[in-house]
Amino acid sequence: MSHKQDTVMKFQYTAEFAQSLDAADTLASYRDRFLFPQHQGISVLYFTGNSLGLQPKGVKEAFVDECDDWATYGVEGHFLARKPWYSYHERFAAGAAKLVGAKEEEVVMMNQLTVNLNLLLVSFYRPQGKRRKILFEAKPFPSDQYAFASQARLHGFEPEDVLVELLPREGEYNLRKEDILETIQRLGDELALVCFGGVNYFTGQLFPMQDIAAAAHAAGVMCGFDLAHAAGNVPLELHDWNVDFACWCTYKYLNSGPGSVGGVFVHERHVTNPDIFRLAGWWGHNKSTRFQMGPVFDPIPTAESWSMSNAPVFNMIAHEVSLGIFSEVGMHALREKSIQLTAYLDFVLQTVMDKTGQRLTRITPDDPQQRGCQLSVIVEGYDRKLVEVLYKQGVVVDWREPDVIRLAPVPLYNSFEDVYRLGKVLETVFSR
Ligand SMILES: *Cc1c(COP(=O)(O)O)cnc(C)c1O
């Protein structure tokens, strides 16, 4: 922890101070648009929006509407439903493009995250000759690592021969930008792909995506990002950053419910390129001839050509509601609050540490430009039972082995007072 943020703003660890920040917060009213889990009859202090975002109000009604349309129209609902199912995924083009900084032709909602990552790896991990390696950050989400390994095997390689996990320097928790760029340059023509998380799920480090993409391209290699912890957390400009592909889930910061539909970005220079191989299905086929049911695949000249199956409408309903809120608020306003709210959390944790003597080591970078809203903290001397102790006090956080709690104050629905009250609970727990 450091007191660096005190130079940005003089924070205080009092209820009045936290309430005064809430009173000045122009996004404060969005809290009322979400349903908070209850513990002993009161709303919990929810700090796990990085794992499963809260339910926006209106989702239940949207489900009922869709059930009604299904009952009313049966198969005709494909065209007659209030939100026609045939083109349901197209409803997301504008909102998803805005969310990740893309053109509408570059995004599509389909499947779920790991499926999409695998599909994109089929297109963009094309080892040839000496170029075989995939470079990724230390401690990627295990699902991504399994996907990389299975793709390596698909091409007949042993994962340990081609997967390169870039570790931080001895004694450090985060990767330095210069080390990432230098490694890409050094591996050069052995690389077949650079694929990082946008924000690492464990440390919360936000990577310099534009620089990584540029370094990858300078080395003659494609570059993709898994944005599971970045989408809805930090502003993204995938098109301008020249990212080749990306995928994200919608149940974390995007509040669209468990297992909700995933998102895909493919840069426009690839979507019409017939040399980019893609696995095919009828939902990627030219819409004007789709129902002629011909035998030959004619890809839509957009990212939609990666979609195979008709839109999973019931897995998209909550996202429709939720993405509407993001379009309304905008990532830049959210980010402004996020930086301040996260700095306040950092300050509160530091204060709790000073008051109780409990050692808390933040492994998320200090620099707001290198993190989103999540702070990951090593809590010395505790194990995962800490999470249960906190839950009994109405606080929801999560635990990652061996000794880390992750805390995400989400700017859409967390308040400064939530952060203050979290501090108070931690203070009592650590003072025992
Ligand atoms: C949450 C998360 C996943 C989960 O994958 P699903 O396919 O949605 O179950 C995968 N990768 C990363 C980086 C994640 O953060």
Image (spheres, rainbow, N blue to C red):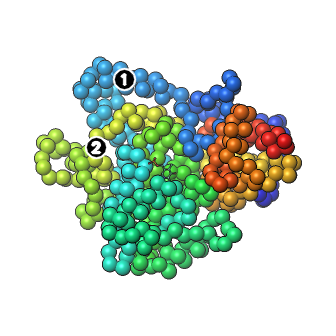
Front residue (pair 403, 69): 403
Q: Element at badge 2?
A: loop
In the rendered image, the vertical position of residue 7 relative to residue 128, given as above or below: above
The quarter holding residue 192 reads bottom left
Which residue is at 85% across, 43% downward?
A: 431
Whether residue 355 appears in this view of the structure is yes
What residue sits right under mark 2 in the picture? Answer: 309
C-alpha separation, residue under disc 2 versus residue under disc 1:
21 Å
Residue 317 in picture, x, y percent from top left: 42, 33
Residue 397 location (% of width, % of height): 66, 42
Q: Nearer the viewer, residue 191 or 208?
A: 191
Residue ID at (32%, 39%) = 311
The residue to which callout 1 is attached is 67
Q: Residue at x 68, y 53 (%)?
A: 403
Dots 2, 1 in contact, CB < 8 A: no
Residue 374 shows in the view: no
Kind of residue at badge 1: Cys
